[in-house]
Amino acid sequence: MVSITPAALARRLWLGCPPGLRRRLLGLALDIVVPRAAGSPPGDGSPTVAGLLRSPTGLGRGARLQGEAFRALGRCPEAADLTALFHDPDPGLPAPRWTAREAGAPPPRGPVIVHLNAPNLRHALAALGRRRIRGRRIVGYWAWELPVLPAAWLPALVHLHEVWTPSAFSAAAIAAATEKPVRVVPHPVAIAQPGRAALGRAAFGLREQDFVALTAFHPASGIERKNPLGTIRAFREAFGGRPGAVLVLKIGGEGPLPWLDGVLAQAGGAGPDIAVLRGDLPDAELTALMACSDVLLSLHRSEGFGLVLAEAMQLGIPVVATAWSGNLDFMPDGSAALVEHCLVPVADPEAIYGDGSHWAEPDTGHAAAWLRRLAADFETRRRLGEAGSAAIAERCGLTAFARALESPPIASGVPAAQSPVWISH
């Protein structure tokens, strides 16, 4: 007779539960372990920035940028890297400079800002531990890409004192679902000139003489939302597959892409005008790829912010993007090639984004006209790139970041006079 240990039996019983029941049980356990937000702790003092600090994803880049901004403001931020909680850290991504706390820095008693969306918040707080978060203001840094916040996100609000979000578009959805303070805090993209690897077009298999349009996304962000099919159709409508123009599809992550063949087939098939680059890149290499491009093209259906778009604009790369959602916060008139659209009901076969809301359907013909104009006129590309860079400096710089922290929250149940002052002079 083979004996079985209690731990092995418990594991067998756990794995034998239906997945839905396992999720509910795990949620109940996390509700017990993770405390609810109580009182109104102050927001001053050294903050803790928690998130995917060793991940090349947009979530990781956003958390690293915020830590750099706090450091530039003299706030001595503490880093709490949660990357290993969700996936393997990128070995090529060094710890940010601000993670090394200066000698004599005060202990972090300011806000704990968690750069993970609602479905992962309780896991993150449990990993941080009660001792680290006790008596401190807990802030969730969230981004959502539709006008209505999902019902599945609402339970996480009880663990937060406040929600920060990078755009007014995202803030409107969150504020409509809670009386907790909601604060628009843009990604401080322009706090410093980004590091750039010494890589030219040849390193990415591109020719010097070609007009190169880049679109970059991660499939986990939602294929229908990122809309690569519309992007390819607009590019081919602009150039008809003729030599001299190449669209680079930079697709993050690893593993198979069962959807890609279908997208290419619907757009006329693979061809020399489409270059596919797979996998994640360190920040400096992604910056180098952007710098090798003539334009960045994003025919998204919706964005909570659009970090890649802002990063390209900072570099002076002209951006062609759908004129709807979070990217409009940093795209005033004349700073980007904004593409016309109509609003349509959400249809997402992946069920990342449920029914009952709407998003944009960009006009591929209008996008194609912009691409032809930019390909033919270097001076227009230069002017648009300069205007975009100036817009990012104004709207996503250190001054804008500090101003956002000092401003009262929006649409909350807390009177403005009770809003915490995050930066003291």
Image (spheres, grey):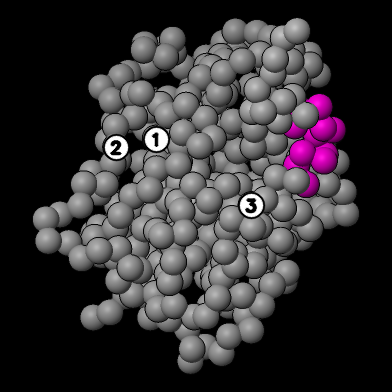
Instruction: Look at the magenta stretch and give its main secondary structure.
Output: helix
Foreground residue, 144 or 388?
144
The residue depicted at 40 percent of the width and 78 percent of the height is 42
Which of the 4 quarters of the picture holds residue 169? bottom right
Q: Which mark, by number, is residue 54?
A: 1
Q: How far across and how far down the image is residue 313, in percent?
A: 43, 45
Is 399 within the magenta? Answer: no
Which residue is at 72% across, 53% downward? 28
Q: Residue at x 58, y 85 (%)?
A: 414
Q: Measuring from the top left, give residue 148's x and y in whole percent.
A: 76, 60
Residue 95: give its label. 2
Task: Report the amino acid beneath label 2.
Answer: Ala
Q: In this rendered view, identify the residue nearer to me: 399 or 281.
A: 281
Is 24 located above or below residue 208 in the figure? below
Query: Considering depth in this image, is 13 or 36 the residue closer to the camera?
Result: 13
Image location (x, y in percent) of residue 390:
36, 55
Instruction: Give the crowd class for mark 3: few <14, some 14-19, many >=20 residues within 10 Å.
Output: some
Q: Secondary structure at mark 3?
A: helix
Amino acid beneath label 3:
Leu
Residue that numbered label 3 is attached to: 30
Instruction: For label 2, count other residues whose C-alpha is less than 10 Å away and answer few (under 14), some (14-19) or many (20+).
Output: some
Of badges 3 and 1, the one in the foreground is 3
